[in-house]
Image: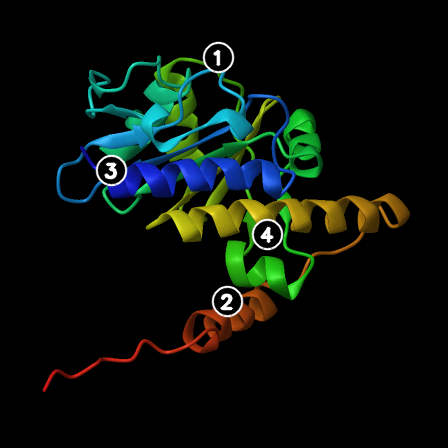
Amino acid sequence: MLEDLKQLVCKANKALKEYNLVKWTSGNVSYRDRESNRVIIKPSGVHFDALNPEDMVVVDLDGNVIEGKLKPSVDTASHLYVYRQRDDIHCIVHTHSPFATSFAIRGMDIPSYTTTAANIFKDNVPCSDFAAIGEEEVGKQIVDHIGDSPAVLLRSHGVFTVGKDIEYALKAAVILEETAEYAHYATLHEPDLMPLSKEVIASCNHFYRTSYGQEKQIIKKG
């Protein structure tokens, strides 16, 4: 079932370690299939290097295991809550990347100090309230605080990024850690540093959305 998607989700989970966003077995990627509404997620407590596509667990939106021999991630209930509330979200990435998590520990949003941050996150990356891990409450915090941003910090825990597909959510996680690192060092030397103005942020974000990347070409048959 969903074999091609299992491969993609497995590859995305392995990428978390490759991008230095996770340590040991903590962190995960899930994906919701658009047609079946089934969710594919990393199994709990398995090292990223040891993951194989057949290890991925398939669940329905109520958390019932449809396929898989291993126990799904302890974050499954949180992921599913987000998917039930947000039809536009099809991938969730969870990490404990160090610089971003340092802001989460302090309960601080990350303002947009760079044009790159403005491109991806607009005004800021918000930080939620505290929530116990393993329950739907984490999902509620994500939905309540993330707005139209692709990223949110969970107070005293870590990072969640979301997207319409795996690439978008994974990219947000990578750029978020970069953004947090730059913000950390910049404010270390200048604590009262002002973020970009709303006008500059809006301009950057609009330009990025309308100009960045390659146009998709329509291939005509015949």
Which mark identifies residue 19?
none
Report the residue marked by disc 4.
175
Residue under pointer 3? 3
Q: Earlier in the sequence, mark 2 or mark 1?
A: 1
Q: Which mark is residue 132?
A: 1
- The image position of residue 153, as x and y in percent, is 55, 34
Q: What is the crowding at mark 3: few (fewer than 14 residues within 10 Å), some, or many (at least 20)?
A: few
Horizontally, is 29 left or right of 126 in the view?
left
Can residue 192 be seen in this snapshot? Answer: no
Q: Taking 196 as reference, is 9 above or below it?
A: above
Extreme-right residue of the structure: 189
> Which residue has dot 2 on it?
205
Q: Residue at x 44, y 41 (%)?
A: 11
The answer to which quarter of the image holds residue 112 is: bottom right
N-terminal of the pair, mark 4 or mark 1, is 1
Q: CA distance from mark 3 to mark 1?
A: 33 Å
Q: Nearer the viewer, mark 2 or mark 3?
A: 3
Under circle 3, the secondary element is helix
Badge 1, how many Cα within 10 Å: few under 14, some, many 20+?
few
The residue type indicated by label 1 comes to Ala
Mark before the other along the chain sequence, 2 or 4: 4
In the rendered image of this protein, does residue 71 appear above or below residue 84? Answer: above
